[in-house]
Image: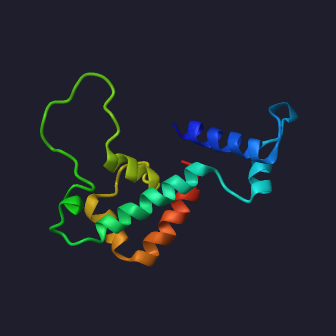
Amino acid sequence: MENKINSFATSCYHIMLNIKRRDRVTNDSIYNLTQTSPLIQHVRRRQLNFLGHILRMPEDEPVRLYALYVPSHGRRRRGRQPTSYFKYVQRLLGDEHNQLTEKQIANLASDKGQWRDLAVACAAADR
């Protein structure tokens, strides 16, 4: 999905700059010409900013309670399990070994400036 988002953005940049595909211009040079970055970086940064906004809400807010909710009951189905939102957030934050807990992520998000810097750094990282 991330590749599709980035390829759509670069194809739009090609159209705006009137660059044909057969000209074989690299994506990096397109980003330099438009002074932008890959679109998926903006998406990741906005996702993390929104999550930080939710995690700074009062504890009794329903959206706050279920932001990083992982059910501890039920039966697992056969096959590869779908990625939960919590696992996706861990991956965005660079936690490959799944060591960050919900409370640790909430503590990180409690400081708005620090969370914003973390969101920018994590979005720019290639994950």
Q: How is the image coloured?
A: rainbow
User: On the picture, is 33 further left or further right than 51?
Assistant: right
Q: How many marks?
A: 0
**Viewer-closest of 64 and 127:** 64
Q: Quadrant of residue 26?
A: top right
The vertical placement of 113 against 77, above or below, is below
Residue 1 vs 51, above or below: the answer is above
Q: Residue at x 18, y 45 (%)?
A: 71
**As drawn, which residue projects farthest toward the left?**
73
Residue lying at 26% horizontally and 71% vertically, measured from the top left: 57
Looking at the image, the residue that sits furthest to the right is 23
Q: Quadrant of residue 21?
A: top right
Residue 96 position within the rendered picture, expressed as x and y whole percent measured from the top left: 44, 48
Residue 124 sits in which quadrant?
Answer: bottom right
Question: Is 37 positioned to the left or the right of 43 in the image?
Answer: right
Q: In the orientation shown, which residue stands out farthest toward the top? A: 78
Q: Is residue 41 left or right of residue 53?
A: right
Picture residue at 21% right of the left edge, 55% below the top: 66
The residue shown at (45%, 75%) is: 114
Q: Residue 93 at what x, y percent from top left?
A: 44, 57
x%, y% of residue 48? 43, 60
* x then y, percent, for residue 51: 36, 61
Residue 114 lies, with reference to residue 55, above or below; the image says below
Q: Is residue 87 above or below residue 78?
A: below
Residue 7 is left or right of residue 15, and the answer is left
